[in-house]
């Protein structure tokens, strides 16, 4: 689906402890909540052992960079999966921008955590993320997932 929603992106540098990254604000032309996302960059060797092992199996080295999509609410926080604001291409456009920025920072992979919201799980699958770990599901959700994709 083509993105028909008009929005501007404000990106700012971010530093959390010893990690750097970007914070994004998605500001819409029409009346709707602002979206947000954050991505942090750090060596693959700092990832949990399950992801480190999987990425090494794929030929990546601990010194290479992973982009951690730490927050991803491009349509605004608290927007339910069945909202008419969803499914308009905003998430895809936001992810494409964040992936391009991650590649500019020489990231070789991107990791993401999903609490198991069905919409986010579907989104991750659609965009080629591979699950490497799951957690017990909460009520009305599928299993929480940790996933990655090579960039």
Image (tube, rainbow, N blue to C red):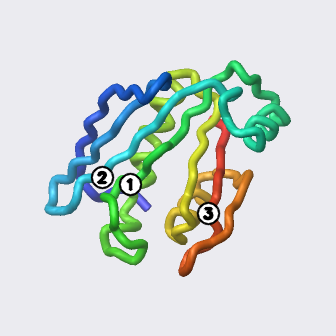
Q: Choose mark 2 or mark 3, whichever is in front.
A: 3
Rendered-image quadrant of the C terminus: top right
Residue occupying image coordinates x 81% and y 37%: 53
Q: Earlier in the sequence, mark 1 or mark 3?
A: 1
Disc 1 versus disc 3: nearer the observer? 3
Q: Are marks 2 and 3 in contact (CB under 8 Å)?
A: no
Q: Nearer the viewer, residue 119 or 15?
A: 15
Element type at mark 1? strand
**Residue at the disc numbered 3:** 144
Position of residue 21 relative to residue 80, above or below, is above
Q: Which is nearer the N-term, disc 2 or disc 3?
A: 2
Residue under numbered circle 1: 73
Instruction: Confirm or deny contact between disc 2 and disc 1 (CB under 8 A).
Output: yes
Residue 54 is labelled as none
Q: How busy is the neighbourhood of tag 2: few (under 14 within 10 Å), some, or many (20 plus)? A: many
Farthest right residue in view: 57
Q: Which residue lies furthest to the top in this view?
A: 63
**Residue at mark 2 to residue at mark 1: CA–CA distance:** 5 Å
Give the image quarter of residue 106: top right
Q: Mark 2 points at which residue?
A: 35
The mark total stands at 3
User: Front-most of 8 and 44?
Assistant: 44
Q: Tell me if mark 3 has few (under 14), some (14-19) or many (20+) residues whose alpha carbon lies within 10 angstroms of its own.
A: many
In the image, residue 67 sits, relative to residue 142, either above or below, namely: above
């Amino acid at each position: 689906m083509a993105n028909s929603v008009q929005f501007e992106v404000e990106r700012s540098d971010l530093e959390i402890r010893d990690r750097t990254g970007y914070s994004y604000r998605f500001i819409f032309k029409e009346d709707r909540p602002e979206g947000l996302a954050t991505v942090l960059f750090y060596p693959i060797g700092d990832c949990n052992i399950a992801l480190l092992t999987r990425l090494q199996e794929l030929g990546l080295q601990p010194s290479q960079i992973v982009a951690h999509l730490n927050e991803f609410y491009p349509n605004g926080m608290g927007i339910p999966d069945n909202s008419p604001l969803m499914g308009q291409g905003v998430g895809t456009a936001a992810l494409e921008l964040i992936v391009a920025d991650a590649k500019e920072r020489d990231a070789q992979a991107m990791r993401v955590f999903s609490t198991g919201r069905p919409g986010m799980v579907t989104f991750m699958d659609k965009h080629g993320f591979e699950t490497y770990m799951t957690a017990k599901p909460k009520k009305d959700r599928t299993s929480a997932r940790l996933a990655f994709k090579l960039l």
